[in-house]
Amino acid sequence: MTQLWNFAGGIHPPENKHQSTTRPIQQAGIPERLVLPLQQHIGEPAEVAVNVGDRVLKGQVVADVTSGMGVPVHAPTSGTIEAVEQLPVPHPSGMADWCVVLKPDGEDQWTELSPISDYKLMDREQVLQIIRNAGIAGMGGAGFPTDIKLRPPRDRKVETLILNGAECEPYITADDMTMREHAAEVVSGMQVMAWILRPARCVIGIEDNKPEAIAAMQAAVQGTQIEIAVIPTKYPSGGEKQLIEILTGLEVPSGGIPADVGVMCQNIGTSLAVSRAVFEGKPLISRVVTLTGEALQQPGNVEALIGTPISYLLAQAGLHPEQLNRLVLGGPMMGYTLHSDDVPVVKTSNCVIAATAGELPAPPPEQPCIRCGQCALACPMELLPQQLFWYAKAAEFEKAEHLNLFDCIECGACSYVCPSSIPLVQYYRYAKGEIRQQRAEQLKSDHARERFEARQARLEREQQEKEQRRKERAKAAAEAQAKKQAEAEQAAQEGEAVDDRAAKAALVQQALERKKAKAAKTAEAAAATPAPSQETASPDTTGEDQALPDIEALEKQLMQAQGKLDTMQGMLEEARAQQADNVDKLERAVAKNHDRVQRAEQALADARNVLAEQTGSAASE
Amino acid sequence: MALVQQSSPHAHNARPTSRVMLWVILAALPGLLAQTLFFGWGNLINVVWCIALALAAEAAILKLRSKPVAFFLKDNTAAVTGLLLGLSLPQFAPWWVSGIAVITAIVVAKQLYGGLGSNPFNPAMVGYALVLISFPVAMTTNWAQAATLWGGAPGFGETLSSIFSASQTTVDGWTMATPLDEYKHKIASHTAAEVLQHPTFGEQIAAGWEWVNLAFLAGGLLLIGLRIITWHIPVAFLAGIALMSLAFGSNPDQYAPLQLHLLAGGTMLGAFFIATDPVSAATSHQGKLIYGAGIGVLIYLIRSWGNYPDAVAFSVLLMNFAVPFIDHYTPPRTYGHHKPRRGLPGRNGG
């Protein structure tokens, strides 16, 4: 007898499974139109590989993922590609997504298949490629590409391979019926996966409410190393983490994957698909779907082609449209309501519940939480549902996260038992959504800040470089001028022997040079005072006619500086009289203005001297 | 075809708060029956009076708070508060004493704190503690003597008129000190054997009281069986009393014996019906154990060394104070985590 462990919490909702197990799996047949969504798996959407109007054969690839994670989509029957368009797909929001629309021709003609007689002679990588090319993604609900899951991280050896036949959700019997009718294929599919992973232990966990399936599987595993573990019926024993705990006593670390504790879980339907892909060469083009609910005349399981409209299946099962109140895809605990039955069956669709109003009634109005703790008793993850509820309601997301909000698997056990009928799971989804959004916004604002800071740094650097270049230019100009002056002096010395006229000309030139130099100095002095008349003392000012306005400007400047100094002194005295706080500041201002006046006076005096010299030399001419 | 859009889960358990409370009321009936059989009509009259007043007070304050009256009255929580007071007050407590207790419980302790689910203190015990402190004479001299309905207890009419009459002169002949009270006050000057001569102790442990407590125990076990309460608080509660008694009060000439602690006074009513009020109790299993044990220990401390012969109300209220603290430090360890995350975010989180 296999040793079993128990998991915390859990509930026993009415099973409602017997309605759909009274008859064997029926073939749903070929509908008028098949709608094949390009994204039926986790990863990148597949890219269309056919053209509208093309005739495709059954099993032919119609779309494939060329880069990134994902699996191809195949034609479930032969026919013509009618369109590639956006159509409603199974999603809680009722959104539309890109789909290939196939019009079956009724011939159901297979493409060439290449079954493998002995996969053990092949390379493991080749078998993984076969699984990928068959379009197999986890059929339990998430749709994670199976070939990628079968490649656990290098440092993680899978010691236990688990096949999840718990099927703990009420109503759903797809895995139950698959095990009853396809036990041998399910086992051979598991053997392929076991050959790839080489685990020490292979175990199929089945809840004890499926005696027929248990018997069929026990017969099928005769002579293999696979064990059948019959586990007590308790929701959610089929949750991956819970089943791992039941069968191995190990817990998947928070935020980790089962491979972290050396375990891998696969779905019953996935195992069947792997078997068909390897031994028959057939890609995943159909799946078993449970059709149940009181609005159906004949509930049961059907093998439906991927892309079959749910309306087609419901009509076959004898839907009473006037009784239909709620259409749930998946189970009553974790499934989501559909906006319409005009969506196709996809690789992850395991159950459709056509419920009447009396069957799944609207919950009574929410009452205050009385802290009864039933939710905590039911929680399989041992969270504190009521504390999480308060924090979610009060928007204290940090605290909710601290209480391990993100470990919530949204199984719905807490909402199920709540006597105040509080939609707890909805609160947690809201809180998770808000936290994810906050994180995304945080990331966005971090990026924006980094961009801004980088820009600021670049602007500053450019400014410095500009300043550097300006200084270099100024230095080069000063050097050039000094050189010119030296040359002029030399020329003057050499020209002493030349005639009077030339000598006079040289003297004039010399005076002009001196004047220029002084003017430059004045300009520097003027530049030091941030007066409005900087331009007037520019070193470009040459010749007599420029000297007069120069002096005028300097006089004006001096007057302005003087005026300002007087004002400041007045203010300072006033401030001193009143013992104001800004005396120090004013004293500094007065001193500064005093310096400014002195500099202006100096500049004016220098300019006057130059003018006098010039006038003198002109007179002597 | 307008399909219903709803977030999962789509299935719900059909046991709303109103039914949970109804079960609590039903589980308390054996205790009420025993009280009536062994002490006369007093408790039954009190229960009816308290429930009626509780519902009226709840309706009035809900109206004042502009809340839907029928919606909240139907949850049966006010009725449970009235019931608990009726069961725990002295049999001959005058109508105005129980009235003040009920109105304090519903209006102040429950509704002024925000109504159902928001009260930090057990409403019934707030009401009880208030009248116990305010009217000590009325709360100690009105306990019925052990006299079965078929032998000695006053009739229904006499009981009714004594409870609702202005002067309580007729009551004296029917009342008696409770066993815990008697033992506490006599043991200082007498031996245990002498104290136990008093008729309040009867032939077994405490005349009538032991049956009342056993009936509440049975009702409590029913609640545990129905998964309405868990075993943690009652077991820790009783263990707290028992361990204290074994550790400090093993000498019967000094302290009341263990069986008297467990089967006299409000012990079982407190353990299964009062301390388990979910709103004001701790939430996690570990927290419930601490909370229950704390009440048990406090009851023993007050009974043995305090001024009051019984102490359920004070002990429950004191531990109500500690609940946020207990909850803060006793979160369960979540699946996939090594340690529970205690405290606040960013501090000593595991």
Image: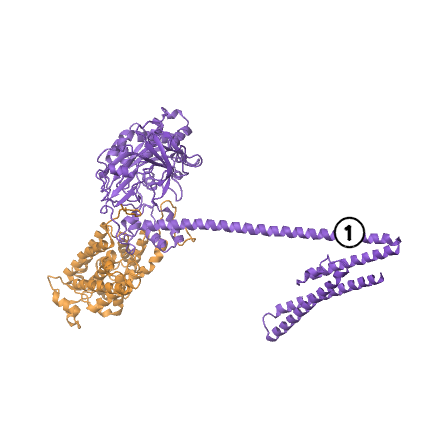
What is the quadrant of the N terminus of chain A in the image?
top left
Query: Disc count in the image?
Result: 1
What is the quadrant of the C terminus of chain A in the image?
bottom right
**Quick check: A323 above or below B69?**
above
Give coordinates of residue A181: x percent, y percent: 26, 31
Q: Residues within 10 Å of mark 1 (few under 14, many from 20)?
A: few
Nearer to us in this view, A519 or A445: A519
Nearer to us in this view, B221 or A20: A20
Give coordinates of residue A280: x percent, y percent: 34, 27
- Which amino acid lies under the numbered mark 1 shown in the image of this protein? Lys
Query: Residue farthest to the bottom?
Result: A577
Residue A476 located left or right of residue A342: right
Nearer to us in this view, B84 or A542: A542
Query: Residue farthest to the left?
Result: B150
Q: How is the image coloured?
A: by chain
Give coordinates of residue A6: x percent, y percent: 30, 42
Nearer to us in this view, A222 or A543: A543
Q: Is residue A538 visible?
A: yes
Letter of the chain that mark 1 sits on in the rendering? A
Q: Which chain is orange?
A: B
User: What residue is shown with label 1?
Assistant: A483
Give coordinates of residue B123: x percent, y percent: 27, 62
**Quick check: A484 above or below A315?**
below
Q: Give SS at disc 1.
A: helix
Q: Is residue B187 visible?
A: no
Residue A191, quarter of the rendered image: top left
Query: Residue farthest to the front?
Result: A545
Q: Which chain is purple?
A: A
